[in-house]
Amino acid sequence: MNTHYGRFGGQYVAETLMAPLKELEAAYESAGNDPAFRREFEEILRDYVGRESPITYARRLSDHLGGARIILKREDLNHTGAHKVNNTVGQALLARRMGKRRLIAETGAGMHGVATATVAALFGMPCEVYMGAIDVERQSPNVERMKMLGAKVHAVTEGSATLKDAMNEALRDWVTNCDDTFYVIGTVAGPAPYPQMVRDFQSVIGVEARRQCLEKYGRLPDQAIACVGGGSNAMGLFAGFIDDPSVRLVGVEAGGKGLASGEHAASINGGRIGVLHGSKTMLLQTADGNVIDTYSVSAGLDYPGVGPEHCHLHDTGRAEYSVINDDEAVAAFDALCRFEGIIPALESSHALAEAIKRAPSLPKDALLLVNLSGRGDKDMENVMRYKAGAKKAD
Ligand SMILES: *Cc1c(COP(=O)(O)O)cnc(C)c1O
């Protein structure tokens, strides 16, 4: 089991959490060795989530750009409309195996909260979700969804009342109730073994996409591109190609209003090493080490840290991490709507924008595989508001 990734990772938690982390580690290891666990996971992904998700050649968009072919991995077609459910299915199965009856989670934009509430309903488990009070207000449709699915949402008013405060509250709940409670973390972050566990559950994305590329094109993609918030959809995609040195792995961070503005969510490109959420990671922080609230037009990329394995892949150079700003992401969002009839999530639009930048200078037989991590119905209002604001500024 991986607990450290070069300089990053580890278990920076209160002593009282070491025992539940050990218990989780042991349970995850035993589940990994049990074919029945794997079989049930795969069955739910197939019959409930609707896997496998296809890959789609974005033909009109690629023709328009006049270079590489852009291929989309369609995580937007999963039940609940994004990749997050792959992971919450896995963790809920593990919770049940461990005899935990209650699920807790923290959420920023609310997407992970919805994915957790979804599997809690599926498995008949009570579910409580911690969410910063400011986020509760900003993301009210997702709060309504969670409640509709039977979850209880706690509005956290401590600190800046956003994601990092919700994380602290969730950890506090877990310390108090670890006998009967499973803490579902939504990305490849948090203390070990979460980064490895979430990567494994999401690796279905990359494993499928690799096979699909070989079947359809007779070769591997030249580049595998994914947006990076905490990094779970990217790590899931990368996992399929990490042993293929010919495939460039490209993570795309949210540049918000630009790196220089300070208003962004680019933890690798704009952060420094620090500890967040029980793990050593690249972190957006002030000179004296206070965590900075992130900004991005896409709420789902608003995580002030990033998974430790990404930090290490950046260190070693196996993966590269670029930055896409709000305006470029919104332009890519529009392009996919108009050229392909697909409304992408604003998060995924960051990965797409990077492919749109790279494609024209590449040969026509090059393949750029983009992880379309989610669908954009949830972002309609946000995009319209962004465009209205941009018009006013002109
Ligand atoms: C949450 C979310 C992300 C960002 O999370 P990662 O852990 O970085 O994958 C990206 N895309 C969508 C659609 C999301 O909901």
Image (cartoon, grey):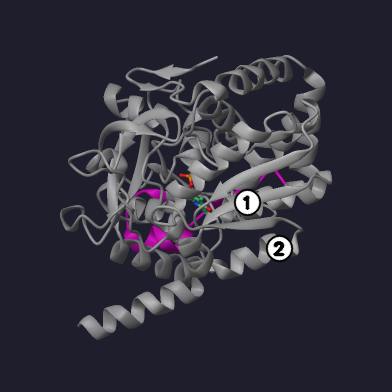
Residue 348 visible here: no
Left or right of 147? Residue 230 is left
Instruction: Name the quadrant of the C terminus.
Output: bottom left
Q: Nearer the viewer, residue 201 or 292?
A: 292
Residue ID at (30%, 29%): 314
* Residue picked out by circle 2: 147
Does mark 2's beta carbon lie closer than 8 Å to ligand 1? no
Residue 307 is tagged as none
Q: Residues within 10 Å of mark 2 (few under 14, many from 20)?
A: some
Residue ID at (45%, 48%): 165
Sequence-wise, the earlier of marks 1 and 2 is 1
Position of residue 127 measured from the top left corner of the image (x, y, whole percent): 72, 48
Q: Secondary structure at mark 2?
A: helix
Stretch in magenta? 50-69
**In the picture shown, does residue 194 fall above or below 10?**
below
Mark 2 residue type: Lys
Position of residue 40 measured from the top left corner of the image (x, y, whole percent): 81, 31
Q: CA distance from mark 1 to mark 2?
A: 10 Å
* Residue picked out by circle 1: 129
**In the picture shown, does residue 349 fall above or below 323?**
below
Quarter where residue 17 is shown: top right
Q: Nearer the viewer, residue 334 or 98?
A: 98
Q: Is residue 148 magenta?
A: no
Left or right of 150? Residue 66 is left
Q: Looking at the image, which residue sits at the far bottom?
A: 392
Position of residue 152 measured from the top left corner of the image (x, y, whole percent): 69, 56
Q: Residues within 10 Å of mark 1 (few under 14, many from 20)?
A: many
